[in-house]
Image (cartoon, grey):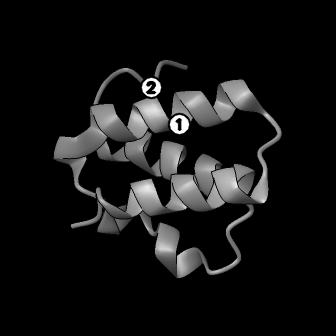
Amino acid sequence: MSLQEPTQDNLNIIINDMAERLQVVNRSLMDPEDYDINKYDEIKSLHDIVEMKGQLSVSEIQAFVQELGQYRK
């Protein structure tokens, strides 16, 4: 499955996967509908980094969640 195309379905997959990987308890922060599809490339880049790193420290998780917050509508 390719996540290269900036579609709403792909954005949903990426945001939900990051919510799992970042162990976000408050899932309302990670509602894919709240994210700007025009920022898809930036969000996808964050997803790629999270995927590549695997295990993240608490401070890294906080940094990623904070960065993601910049791409909310």
Asked if 58 appears above or below 31 in the picture, the reply is: above
> Image quarter for residue 45?
top left
* Of labels 1 and 2, the one closer to you: 1
Q: Please give left or right for residue 46 compared with residue 23 in the image.
A: left
The quarter of the rendered structure image containing the N terminus is top right
Chain-order first, disc 1 or disc 2:
2
Residue 7 position in % (x across, y down): 29, 38
Which residue is drawn at the image coordinates 55% and 55% (left, top)? 63
Q: Which mark is residue 3?
A: 2
User: Circle 1 — which element?
Assistant: helix
Which residue is drawn at the image coordinates 21% and 67% (left, top)? 73
Q: Please give left or right for residue 58 compared with residue 27 in the image.
A: right
Residue 19 position in % (x across, y down): 63, 58
Label 2 neighbourhood size at 10 Å, few (<14), some (14-19), many (20+)? few
Q: Residue furthest left?
A: 38
Residue type, mark 1 in image: His
The answer to whether marks 1 and 2 mark residues whose Cβ atoms lie closer than 8 Å is yes
Q: Nearer the viewer, residue 27 or 67?
A: 67
Q: Residue furthest right?
A: 55
Asked if 30 appears above or below 1 in the picture, the reply is: below
User: Circle 2 — which element?
Assistant: loop
Residue 25 position in % (x across, y down): 71, 77
Q: Residue furthest front?
A: 59
Which residue is drawn at the image coordinates 66% and 50% (left, top)? 60
Residue 66 position in % (x across, y down): 46, 62
Asked if 44 appears above or below 72 in the picture, the reply is: above
Label 1 neighbourhood size at 10 Å, few (<14), some (14-19), many (20+)? some
Which residue is drawn at the image coordinates 49% and 75% (left, top)? 29
Residue type, mark 2 in image: Leu
Q: Which mark is residue 47?
A: 1
Marks 1/2: CA–CA distance: 10 Å
